[in-house]
Amino acid sequence: MSHALIIVDIQNDFVEGGSLAVEGGTALAHRLANYLCENPNKYDLIATTQDWHIDPGTHFSDDPDFIDSWPPHCRANTPGSDIVDALAQTLKTIGVDIAVKKGHYEAAYSGFEGITQKGEKLAPTLRTVGVTKVTIVGIATDYCVRQTALDAAKEGFETRVWTQMCAGINPAKIEETCSVDFPAAGITVF
């Protein structure tokens, strides 16, 4: 059994000071970077996901509803779309096996909707290298982490979400996600 860590959307626009900041995002980036420095060989493979918006249509709005539309964020090839520096430096040292970019021309909440640097989808890429188990961390627990985890389980991967290595937006939605949605999908929360 091969075990992958999927790091979801720990990007500059999603941490404090970013255009769509999630409280605790910067601290999360540092915690995860420190953990990976201390445990560089814990996982057989590391994958990152990034929002990478080129022209996402109605996903961006000057008057967002914060459900289907959001303020502009993570525009492709801008500093806001970059992985937070503390984590990026650690990942540069230990290596990233798969980089997924999502949401080029529409909303995309799941890393399984994006494409890898080789232009492939994440699920078959993971299967090709023998991954059967995934641990998911990142931003935001109640949006992109949630959807990535649900899709991982749907794809047949043994799926775990490490909540101490996640940051979310709405406490009530995070609670429902972790106590109802994840268990119903067979996802382990720890």
Image: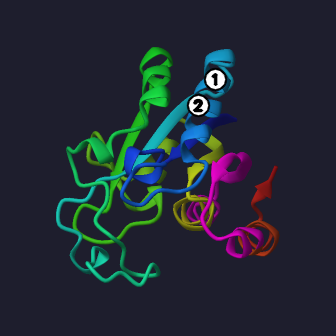
Q: Position of residue 48 (x, y in %)?
A: 46, 41
Can residue 151 be found in the magenta stretch? yes
Give residue 96's quadrant in the image: top left
Q: Position of residue 182 (x, y in %)?
A: 74, 67
Element marked by disc 1:
helix
- Disc 2 crowd, CA 10 A, few/some/many (<14, 14-19, 20+): some
User: Which is more toward the observer, 38 or 111?
Assistant: 38
- Disc 1 crowd, CA 10 A, few/some/many (<14, 14-19, 20+): some
Mark 2 highlights which residue? 30
User: Does residue 172 appear left or right of residue 77 in this picture?
Assistant: right
Q: Position of residue 89 (x, y in %)?
A: 44, 21
> What range of the chain is rendered magenta?
150-175
Q: Residue at x 75, y 75 (%)?
A: 176
Mark 1 highlights which residue? 34
Please say whether residue 185 is visible from this viewpoint: yes
Q: Residue furthest front?
A: 17
